[in-house]
Image: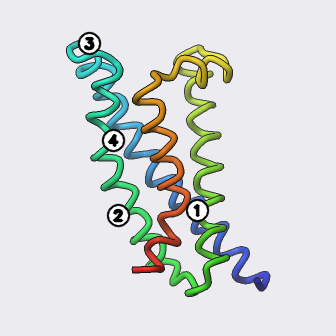
């Protein structure tokens, strides 16, 4: 991978993570304030997942096209890796600053069912720029 491709993948990963984080912040706010009190944490999180899936797909499509990412699996995979790393960092930071939780609590308080779906979505998020390349 050339230096230009490396810089392109990093910039694309930052934009990709930013788009998904912004949408997740909005959807998460609605989930926490309005849906969780009525349905419970598990069902509210599971209800949010299909919307986040759409956001992830659209953000990956936008990022791949906007940055005209090379049809090289390493560039696309690095974009996803940068994106998922940044997204997790932002989510942890948000939980520490806004929710007053420790990083450990962020992981330990995950519901077993919706938490597993969350981890699956993280994997999907990380792979989506590459998956978009396949299609």
Lower position in the chain sequence, tag 3 or tag 2: 3
Badge 2 local density, few (<14 within 10 Å), some, or many (20+)? some
Kindly check if marks 4 and 3 are in contact, taking CB atoms under 8 A apart as contact: no
Residue nearer the viewer, 48 or 112: 112
Q: Which of the marked residues, 2 or 1, is nearer the chain's N terminus?
A: 2
Mark 4 residue crowding within 10 angstroms, few (<14) / some (14–19) / many (20+): some
Q: CA distance from mark 2 to mark 4?
A: 14 Å
Relative image position of residue 76 (x, y in whole percent): 59, 73
Q: Say whether disc 3 or disc 1 marks the residue closer to the N-terminus.
A: 3
Q: CA distance from mark 1 to mark 4?
A: 19 Å
Q: How many marks?
A: 4
Q: What residue sits 47% from the left and 79% below the top?
A: 133
In front: mark 4 or mark 3?
4
Residue 43 coordinates in the image, percent (x, y)? 28, 25
Instruction: Assess disc 3: are there few (<14), some (14-19) or many (≥20) residues with their C-alpha within 10 Å of its C-alpha.
Output: few
Left or right: where 13 falls relative to 110: right
Q: Which residue is mark 2?
A: 58
Kindly identify the residue that appears in the image at 46 percent across and 38 percent down.
118
Relative to 61, residue 18 above or below = above
Residue lying farthest to the left in this orientation: 38
The residue carrying mark 1 is 80
Question: Which of the two labelled residues, at mark 4 and mark 3, occupies the earlier sequence position?
Answer: 3
Q: Secondary structure at mark 2?
A: helix
Secondary structure at badge 3 equals helix
Residue that label 3 marks: 37
- Marks 3,1: beta carbons within 8 A: no
Label whose residue precedes the other's in the sequence (1 or 4)? 4
Counting residues from the start of the chain, the first of labels 2 and 4 encountered is 4
The residue singled out by tag 4 in the image is 49
Residue at the image point whose x is 51% and y is 23% from the top: 110
């Amino acid at each position: 991978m050339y230096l230009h491709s490396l810089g392109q993948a990093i910039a694309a990963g930052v934009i990709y993570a930013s788009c998904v984080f912004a949408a997740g912040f909005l959807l998460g706010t609605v989930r926490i304030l309005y849906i969780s009190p009525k349905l419970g944490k598990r069902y509210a999180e599971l209800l949010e997942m299909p919307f986040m899936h759409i956001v992830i797909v659209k953000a990956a499509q936008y990022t791949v096209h906007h940055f005209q990412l090379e049809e090289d699996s390493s560039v696309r995979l690095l974009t996803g890796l940068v994106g998922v790393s940044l997204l997790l960092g932002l989510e942890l930071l948000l939980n520490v600053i806004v929710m007053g939780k420790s990083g450990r609590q962020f992981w330990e308080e995950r519901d077993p069912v919706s938490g597993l779906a969350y981890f699956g979505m993280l994997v999907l998020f990380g792979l989506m720029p590459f998956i978009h390349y396949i299609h």
